[in-house]
Amino acid sequence: RPPNIVFIIADDMGINDISTFGGGVAGGRVPTPNIDRLAAQGAVFTQAYAGTATCAPSRAMIMTGRYPTRTGFEFTPTPDGMGRILKLFSDDMDNGMPPLEYDAAIDKANPTYNRQGLPGSEVTIAEMLKTVGYHTVHIGKWHLGLGPEYGPNAQGFDESLLMASALHLPENDPNVVNARLPFDPIDIFLWARMQFAAAYNEGEWFKPGGYLADYWTDEAIKVIRENRNRPFFLNVAHWGVHTPLQATREDFEAVGPMEPRRLQVYAAMVRSIDRSVGRIMEALEAEGLAENTIIVFTSDNGGAGYIGLPEVNKPYRGWKMTLFEGGIKVPLFISWPGRIQPGSTIPAPVGHIDITPTLAAAAGASLPQGVAIDGVDLLPQAMGSPTAGPPHDALFWQSGYYKAVRQGDWKLQVSDMPAKTWLYDLASDPTEKTNLSASRPDKVAELTELLRRHHEGAVPSLYKATVQGPIAVDKTAADTVRPEDELVFWPN
C-alpha cells in the first residue's frame, strides 16, 4: 500500500536549537537525540529554507508548493487588535529602537483574523492525498484561516484537532514553569489575551489534556493506532518553541539550572519537541508501520530574536522576521526506510515549497492540473539518483517591500525601509558578514532582474500589512540598540 506520511513541524525552532548540526541549546547542554536519530536514518537537507521568515506564509507554501506571488498569502494573520496593541507596548519600550509603525485604516479595512486565510481555491497536499485514498488528520497549529472556507476541514483534512489559542498550559497550572519577556511586545500581548484551548473539527473549545507538545503527541499516537490498516497523512504542527515561554516542571528541572531563567524554560521546550518526535517514531515501530512510513521534520522559520537568546540561529545572522540566513534557514529531514539511505546528505538549496510535490510523488498522487507549482519533487535527490540535478535555479522570499533571492551561491536582499541592498556570496561568506553590493553592481543588477521577473504578474496580497516592525539583525530584543546597529523593518 502507499506509504503513511507523518509531517512534523516545530514553531520558531532555530537551526542551532537541535544538536544534529553540532549545536544545541545552551552550548549543546541540551541535545536532541530523537530528532538526531530521525535525521540519521534518512536524508538531511543541509541548505533547506523556510518559505519565508514568519509562520503562516511558510505553512501556506508547505501546503500548496506555491509562492505568495501565486496565492496572495503573503502576510501572517494576526489576532484582531494586535497591531494597535503592539504599537502601544512598543512605544513604552526604552531599547533604542525606532518606533513600530501601525496603520489603523488598513487594519480596519483588512478581513477579520479568521478570514485572513489560504483561499479555498488553492489545492493542498491533504486534498491531493485524499484522491489516492489517504485518511488525513491535522493536529496543532493551523494559522491559515478558520471556518467553512479556510479551516483544515475545508482544505482536505478529514479530521482536525486545532490549537484554539496560545497558552501551552494554564499560567497557574501546578506543573508549569513560565518565563515572561518584559522587553517583547508580542509576549506581553500573548499573556494578556491568550487562553489554553483546543477544538476538534472547529467545534467548541475545550481544555487540552496536558502540556500542548505532549497532548498533541498523545493524540497523534492515537491516530497512528486507529489508522494502522489504511494509509494516513498526519500533520503534527507543534506550537513549541514559540512564545509564551512555558515548560513542564519536569522538563525544566531535567535540563538543569541555566541563566537567564528564560533559557532554561526554552531549553525545556526544545526537550519536549524532541520527546514528541521520539514518541511518534516509537509508536510507528510498535504498530509495525515504521518501514512503510515517511517522516518529515522541519521548522516554520528561524529562531526569534524577541525571546532574548542570542544563540538560537548560531552561526547565522538574523532572526525570524528578517531574510538573513538566521531567519529562513531551517532543518529539513526526510526519512523513508528502504527508499532513502540512512545518512544521506543533500547540500543543494531547497525550500518548503518542495514538500508538497515531494509527498505527492511518494504517494502516487497527481499535482493539480492547470496549477503552477513552484516546488519540485526532492525524492531524486533524497534517493541519490545519479541524474538528479539542482532542484532550483533560484529561490525567492518576500514580505511586502522586503524581498530576497538566492541563485547558486549568490543571495540578494532588498528593502525600501531602510532603502538598502545586501549582496552576499554564501560560498565564501555563509554567515553574511560582508555586503558586496557596492563592489558587485553587476551581480546586484542580475539578481534584481530575477526578482523583477518573479514578481511580474504576481497576484495582489489577500490583505495588506498593518505594521512595519524594526528588527535588529545582530541583537536580540533584550539588548539595547545603538545608532550603528543594522536594522531591517518587517512589514506584516
Image (cartoon, rainbow, N blue to C red):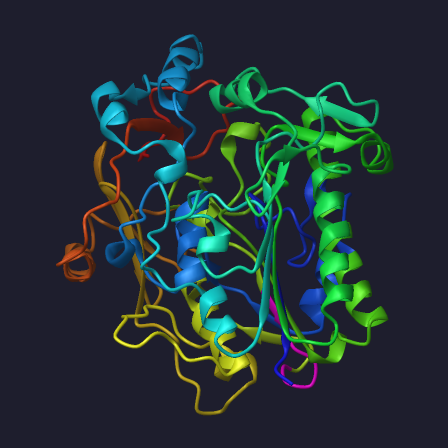
Measuring from the top left, give residue 89's x and y in whole percent: 43, 13
On-image quarter of the N terminus: bottom right
Measuring from the top left, give residue 266's x and y in whole percent: 68, 34
Left or right of residue 35, residue 318 in this image: left
Q: Which residues are magenta?
A: 333-340
Residue 97: which quarter of the image? top left
Q: Nearer the viewer, residue 341 or 60?
A: 60
Residue 424 lies, with reference to residue 192, above or below; the image says below
Measuring from the top left, give residue 51's x and y in whole percent: 40, 55
Question: Overall secondary structure of the magenta stretch?
Answer: loop
Residue at point 40%, 57% (across, down): 61
Q: Residue furthest bottom?
A: 386
Residue at point 71%, 66% (across, down): 38
Can residue 183 be found in the magenta stretch? no
Residue 128: which quarter of the image? bottom left
Residue at point 84%, 33% (across, down): 256
Left or right of residue 105, residue 426 in this image: right
Residue 206 lies, with reference to residue 426, above or below; the image says above
On-image quarter of the C terminus: top left
